[in-house]
Amino acid sequence: MSTIPAARAPQADTARPASGARAELARRSWYYMSLMREVEDRIERKLYRQGKILGGVYVGRGQEAIPVGSALHALPQDVLLPSHRDMAVFFIRGVPLGRIFAQYMGRADGLTRGRDGNMHMGDMSVGVVSIISALAATVPVAAGVAMALRYQGKDGVAFSYFGDGATSRGDWHEGVNFASVQKLPVVYICNNNQYAYSTPLTSQMACANVADRGPAYNIPAEIVDGNDVLAVYDATGRAVEHARSGLGPYLLECKTFRMTGHSAHDAAHYVPPEMFEDWSKRDPITLVETRLVDEGWAERAEMDELRAGVVREVDEAVAWAEKSPYPDPATLLDGVYE
Ligand SMILES: Cc1ncc(C[n+]2csc(CCOP(=O)(O)OP(=O)(O)O)c2C)c(N)n1
Ligand SMILES: [Mg+2]
């Protein structure tokens, strides 16, 4: 297969009258969130329904501000451990869109070379650790990553992503405790979307906030508006500065809502409909778009053009991935443990 370029992030445009660091950040955030929405819509609402993707499909609809606002802080030496609603982490690290579609369609050019037709993927060449299916198992791994970075004399930070439900698992507590005792450079990013599959928050933890778990491990914890990408960006900045300067881990609880069922095969009948209605008024992409226009950082017409560009980019990536072959059965045992 020919090589395919990484996501086309807009570059700083110094000719724009209203451009400044904040405007450029908002534009970049809008782009990555819109790309994640379009890629996941294509996966869940088209390719999956066409039978081109098999198995479970999980998306981060309405939660895009969390991976975007946080991962935009990552430096090349940092290592990210995304969870199943953090697709944008891959784009921000430069993984080509075509490879993501090839992954989901089980093709040889997918990140797992056709071994997994799902989101259990990573790419250590760009510092992204593969998603681990067992909830919270990634949290002790993040501590190990941070310890390795320190041992190697790098000033990298581990970005550890998980949901609210994961924080009730034993591995979560063990991993966070160890990282705190060792003062490891880990930033914990919790997507609190108020459900763990069909279990609402109140049936799964006795404290009001995930952030309330921070003091037990003597680490700073912040509650963040998880639908405001600039708020997530600012909070992550504080967390990364803390971790990188040797002060140890930092916990961010990003409050948001899962605007879908748990997965493509779950209609979420157990969620009160008014919750969807209320949260639809706080769509993170619409919020930043309104901000862009209100601040004079972008024109409406320009946003429409940019959106069309995102759709074109995704069309090209899907077409590229559909040309990728299925893996050669003779390679079945390559890359696995004996
Ligand atoms: C140890 C373990 N138990 C159960 C599951 C099945 N499972 C996958 S995701 C999920 C819900 C996770 O909830 P949360 O951590 O809040 O993340 P969310 O899906 O809401 O983003 C469950 C129960 C699993 N993957 N691992
Ligand atoms: Mg959850």
Image (tube, rainbow, N blue to C red):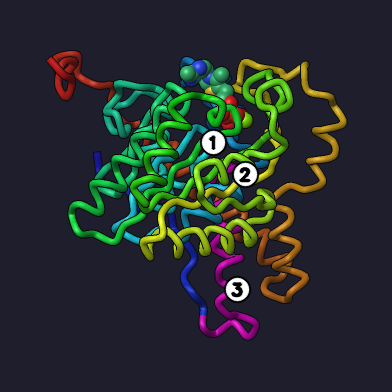
Secondary structure of the residue carrying tag 3 is helix
1 or 3: tag closer to the N-terminus? 3
3 or 2: tag closer to the N-terminus? 3
Q: Residues within 10 Å of mark 3 (few under 14, many from 20)?
A: few
Instruction: Tell me, yes or no, whether the two marked residues, 3 and 2, touch with CB atoms within 8 Å.
Output: no
Instruction: Tell me, yes or no, whether the two marked residues, 1 and 2, touch with CB atoms within 8 Å.
Output: no
Q: What residue sits right under mark 1 in the picture?
A: 85
Q: What residue sits right under mark 3 in the picture?
A: 22
In the drawing, does residue 191 fall left or right of residue 256?
left
Q: Which mark is residue 211?
A: 2
Closest to the observer, 278 or 243:
243
Residue 51 appearing in the image: no
Q: Is residue 35 above or below residue 204?
A: below
Q: Residues within 10 Å of mark 1 (few under 14, many from 20)?
A: many
Residue 33 appearing in the image: yes
Calculate the distance from the C-alpha at mark 1 to the C-alpha at mark 2: 20 Å
Closest to the observer, 157 or 281:
157
Q: Quadrant of the N terminus?
A: top left
Calculate the distance from the C-alpha at mark 3 to the C-alpha at mark 2: 27 Å
